[in-house]
Image (cartoon, helix red, strand yellow):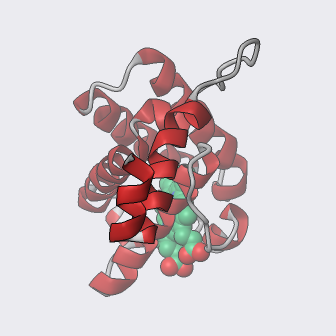
Amino acid sequence: MLIKSVSRTNPLKIIALTACLAMPLLAMPSAGMAAEKPTLYERLGGYDAITAVTHDVAARLMADPKMGRFWAHRGKDGIDREVQLIIDFIANQAGGPRYYTGRDMKLAHVGMRIDGEDWDRLITHLKATLDKFNVPQKERADVLAFFESTRKDIVEVK
Ligand code: HEM
């Protein structure tokens, strides 16, 4: 008998085998249960896709002559930490399984005197990145709407 021979070799195998057999049943939506709508996090391609997009936008911003001032004379580790926090923030807000440990948008940017032109440049770079990664129209619109929702807390100088 299968179970008997497995139990003689290693009891842990029984647990593993039971879990493997039960898994497809657990994953199956029961009759009448509506399938969950995918989150923006999932529709964007998850953590790796959000990381790639964030790094690409960050590189464009830091190379922009008007925007470079925000990252001038800052250490590499500090910048890496900031980019990681941005990835976590976006992933968290998009419904992904990420815990955001940073500050809220107002507190994180207050005093930088970010103005309307800085914001427009950010959006121009973001659009170029979304084009580069061929992000579909629906997800593109959702990402742009999400960024727009943070504007009021970030732009200080009209
Ligand atoms: C023109 C627009 C923006 C500029 C110039 C800018 C610049 C910066 C800078 C220089 C920092 C580092 C702050 C520090 O080390 O104390 C920072 C932090 C951060 N930014 Fe922005 N940012 C902009 C827009 C955004 C947007 C749209 C988001 C979110 C979608 C965002 C998310 C964050 C996060 C999560 C942090 C880290 C917060 C923390 O350290 O606790 N930023 N930003």
Specify whether residue 118 is in view.
no
Please give the name of the residue rendered at 43% of the width and 34% of the height, measured from the top-left corner.
44
Up the image or down, 34 lies above or below 25; here it is: above
- Residue reaching furthest to the top: 32
Please give the name of the residue rendered at 71% of the width and 64% of the height, measured from the top-left corner.
106
Up the image or down, 102 lies above or below 54; here it is: below
Up the image or down, 31 lies above or below 70; here it is: above
Determine which quarter of the picture holds residue 81.
Answer: bottom left
Up the image or down, 76 lies above or below 123; here it is: below
Residue 41 lies, in percent from the top left, at 51, 40
Determine which quarter of the picture holds residue 100.
Answer: bottom right
All told, the count of numbered labels is 0
- Residue reaching furthest to the right: 32
Residue 131 lies, in percent from the top left, at 29, 27
Residue 116 lies, in percent from the top left, at 56, 46
Determine which quarter of the picture holds residue 22.
Answer: top right
Q: Is 139 on the left or on the right of 135, as rendered?
A: right
